[in-house]
Image (cartoon, coloured by chain):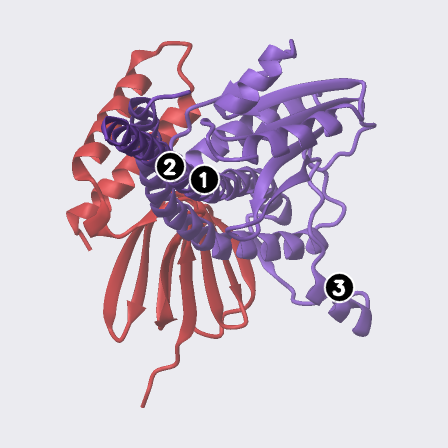
Chain colours: A purple, B red
């Protein structure tokens, strides 16, 4: 039978845990707002890049580019993006579960880990990683995405990878984060929907708008394709960051609530015990007095 | 009479730097300087690191752009820059340090040095300093 003092100690410890959870939730909320803003701010660029690439792709259909060459997929690289830290509910484990499933589809898989959790996960399971990028910090810069993208692009051009996929957590909303697998390489140029329609309507010779390219469509494409890959990686990183922070916020919110419930329950038990003690003492006194009479 | 304008947007991967109706855009393309007035023909060109100037209501706004490309279409000019800054945002000290570092690298003749990269870094730093110096 635990004594009153034990209950007091338990309550005190749960209370301080609750305080930590609350503080972490507040921090995650603030960081999530920032990460979300970054995702929104990055959208116009992504949209424009997408559009332009579609148009350039249509205009220079037969251009050869090492990033467009499709090879028979044998050596597959996965870039797995997780958080650096835990305490964010099922965020990392959901993503890594998806990654594990994906990885089993192929015989020859190479890994690039982004985030400490991904690295430790694969290291623990004895996987070899071609590269690891950890400790990216809270505010993701474009250069960080660029660095990862350049690494896989170089390997792809060198023929060490036949296809590169990116696995990251998409920020759907605060409650939902969805693991996403997208193909980075070879680049599949987005179709220029508008242009394609116009091309069908008009004579096939005069496809949509006639652009002047400086220096040439090839040169522009050579510039655009790596940018497109870099931007895709950057996009994955910031989406993942926003997802991580919202997952952490939800997890910490639940933890704070659970701690509150635990405190209530412990307080009730403690009061019951105290009341029991008082009743017992009263009975003793009343019993003693009755015996004297 | 209101002068004819075109939509001008400067976006970087991280944010939208500029988005307004303006009269004239002057940029440094890889093939040379170019100026774009409203109703320009569709064009896509890559940009060299350099200053980009936008004229609106007779006033010039300057940006330091470190490479990227520019698309003109339907009376809209879209600049997709790797980075673009207003002169007042530029960290002059940092740009100076970057310039010195790049110059040292180029001067050192070390075979390990990535010359094109150092040159690009030098150019970026010079552009930033030029924009911050307010020479225009």
Q: Which residue position is annotated with label 1?
A: A258
Residue at 26% x, 42% y: name it.
B128
Tag 1, which secondary structure?
Answer: helix
Residue A107 placement, left or right of A10: right
Compared to residue B132, the image places residue A71 above or below, namely: above
Return the disc, 3 or 2, that comes first in the chain's sequence.
Answer: 3
How many badges with numbers are in the image?
A: 3
Residue A90, visible in the rendered structure: yes
Work out whether residue A39 or residue B13 is closer to the camera in this orientation and state it: A39
Work out whether residue A84 or residue A232 is closer to the camera in this orientation and state it: A84
Tag 2, which secondary structure?
Answer: helix
Q: Which residue position is annotated with label 3?
A: A196
Chain identifier of the residue bearing label 3 in the image: A
Work out whether residue A225 or residue A33 is closer to the camera in this orientation and state it: A33
Measuring from the top left, give residue A234's x and y in whole percent: 50, 39
Residue B96 is drawn in which quadrant?
Answer: top left
Return the disc, 3 or 1, that comes first in the chain's sequence.
Answer: 3
Measuring from the top left, give residue B39's x and y in whole percent: 49, 74
Q: Which residue position is annotated with label 2?
A: A272
Return the disc, 1 or 2, that comes first in the chain's sequence.
Answer: 1
Q: Are marks 3 and 1 on the same chain?
A: yes
Residue A117 placement, left or right of B124: right
């Amino acid at each position: 039978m635990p004594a009153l003092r034990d209950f007091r100690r338990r309550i005190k410890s749960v209370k301080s845990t609750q305080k930590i959870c609350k503080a972490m939730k507040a921090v995650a909320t603030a960081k999530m707002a920032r990460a979300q803003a970054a995702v929104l701010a990055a959208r116009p660029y992504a949209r424009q890049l997408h559009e332009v690439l579609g148009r350039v792709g249509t205009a220079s259909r037969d251009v050869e580019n090492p990033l467009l060459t499709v090879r028979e997929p044998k050596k597959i690289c996965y870039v797995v993006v997780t958080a650096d830290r835990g305490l964010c509910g099922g965020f990392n484990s959901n993503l890594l579960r998806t990654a594990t499933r994906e990885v089993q589809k192929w015989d020859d898989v190479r890994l690039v880990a982004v985030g400490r959790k991904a690295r430790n996960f694969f290291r623990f399971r004895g996987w070899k990683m071609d590269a690891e990028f950890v400790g990216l910090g809270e505010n993701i810069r474009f250069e960080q995405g660029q660095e990862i993208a350049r690494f896989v692009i170089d390997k792809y051009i060198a023929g060490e990878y036949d296809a590169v996929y990116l696995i990251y957590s998409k920020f759907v909303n605060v409650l939902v984060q969805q693991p996403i697998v997208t193909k980075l390489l070879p680049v599949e140029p987005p179709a220029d929907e508008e242009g394609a329609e116009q091309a069908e309507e008009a004579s096939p010779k005069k496809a949509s708008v006639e652009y002047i390219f400086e220096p040439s469509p090839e040169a522009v494409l050579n510039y655009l394709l790596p940018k497109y890959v870099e931007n895709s990686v950057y996009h994955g990183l910031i989406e993942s960051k926003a997802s991580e922070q919202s997952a952490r916020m939800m997890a910490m919110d639940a933890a704070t609530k659970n701690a509150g419930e635990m405190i209530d329950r412990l307080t009730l038990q403690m009061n019951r015990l105290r009341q029991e003690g008082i009743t017992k003492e009263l009975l003793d006194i009343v019993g003693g007095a009755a015996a004297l009479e | 009479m209101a002068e004819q304008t075109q939509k001008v947007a400067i976006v970087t991967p991280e944010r939208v730097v500029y988005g307004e109706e303006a009269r004239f855009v002057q940029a440094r393309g890889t093939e040379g300087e170019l100026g774009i007035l409203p109703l320009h023909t569709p064009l896509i060109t890559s940009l060299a690191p350099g200053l980009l100037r936008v004229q609106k209501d007779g006033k010039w706004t300057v940006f330091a752009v470190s490479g990227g490309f520019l698309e003109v279409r339907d009376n809209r000019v879209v600049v997709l820059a790797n980075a673009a800054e207003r002169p007042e945002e530029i960290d002059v000290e940092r740009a100076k340090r970057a310039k010195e570092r790049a110059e040292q690298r180029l001067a050192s003749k070390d075979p390990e040095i990535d010359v094109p990269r150092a040159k690009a870094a030098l150019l970026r730093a010079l552009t930033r300093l030029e924009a911050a110096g307010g020479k225009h």
